[in-house]
Amino acid sequence: MNAEAQPTYVPRHLSADAPQGDSPLEAPQTSAYSDIDQTVRAQGAGGTIRLFTENAVAPLSMTITELVNGAPAQGYSVSLVGAMSVGRGPACDLQLSEGTVSAMHLKLEHTGGELIATDLNSSNGTLVNGRRIAEPTVIHSGDTLRLGNAVLQIEF
C-alpha cells in the first residue's frame, strides 16, 4: 500500500437497478490481503447486495512480555487486528493478575498502520516509557508500558 492510502472498510452495494456491464461495483475488489477481505452476498426482492472489505489491514504480529523486577516473566504472542483490551478483569483480551492493574485498564489498537495505546480511565494510570499518557499514544517496537505496577514490553 502506498503512504496516501489509508486502510478503510468500505461497504459497496449492487442492486438490481445498478448499471450492468462495465460497472466497477459488479465484482468485489480485493486488496493485497485478500485472505482478510470478506464478501457477503444476500438475495432479496431488490436484487443482490455485495458487501466487502477494501484495503484490509494485515494483522500486527507482536510480542508482549511482562517484566518482573526488570526481567522477562511471561510472554504473549499476539496477532492483532483491530483492538484488544488489557486489564485485570475476566473480560480483557490480555488478563494480568497484578493487583494495581484496573479491571479494564488499557486499549491497544492497530489502526492506520500504527499501534495506539489508550488508557481507559484506570485508577493508577498508564505510562509509556516512563511518561504518563492522557490521550491515545503511538507505541513503537521496544516501548515499555507500565500499568499500575505491571510492566509490559512491546516488540513488533
Image (spheres, helix red, strand yellow):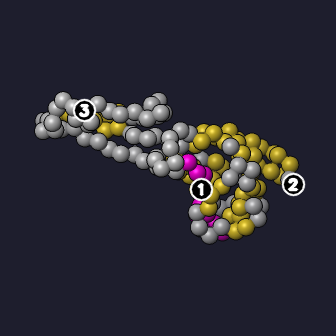
Q: Residue at x 12, y 38 (%)?
A: 17
Earlier sequence position, callout 2 versus callout 1: 2
Q: Position of residue 42 (x, y in %)?
A: 24, 33
Report, in whole angstroms, how far the alpha carbon at label 2 lies from the one at label 3.
Answer: 58 Å
Name the element at disc 3.
loop
Q: Residue at x 50, y 41 (%)?
A: 1
Q: Is residue 115 visible?
A: yes
Dot 2: few (<14), some (14–19), or many (≥20) neighbours within 10 Å? Answer: few
Which numbered disc covers residue 116?
1
Nearer to us: label 2 or label 1: 1
The three-letter amino acid code for the residue at tag 2 is Asn
In the image, 154 versus 102, the foreground residue is 154
In the image, 95 versus 134, the foreground residue is 134
Q: Residue at x 40, y 46 (%)?
A: 9
Quarter-wise, where is residue 76 in the image? top right
Residue beneath disc 2: 69
Residue beneath disc 3: 26
Q: Is residue 9 left or right of residue 123?
A: left
Q: Is residue 111 left or right of residue 146?
A: left
Nearer to us: label 3 or label 1: 3
Q: Residue at x 32, y 44 (%)?
A: 11
Query: Which range is magenta?
Result: 113-125
Say above or below: 17 vs 108: above
Name the element at disc 1.
strand
In the image, 146 versus 50, the foreground residue is 50
Q: Is residue 77 left or right of residue 25?
A: right
Dot 1: few (<14), some (14–19), or many (≥20) neighbours within 10 Å? Answer: some
Q: Are marks 2 and 1 in contact (CB under 8 Å)?
A: no
Report, in whole angstroms, how far the alpha carbon at label 3 lies from the one at label 1.
Answer: 36 Å
Name the element at disc 2.
loop
Nearer to us: label 2 or label 3: 3
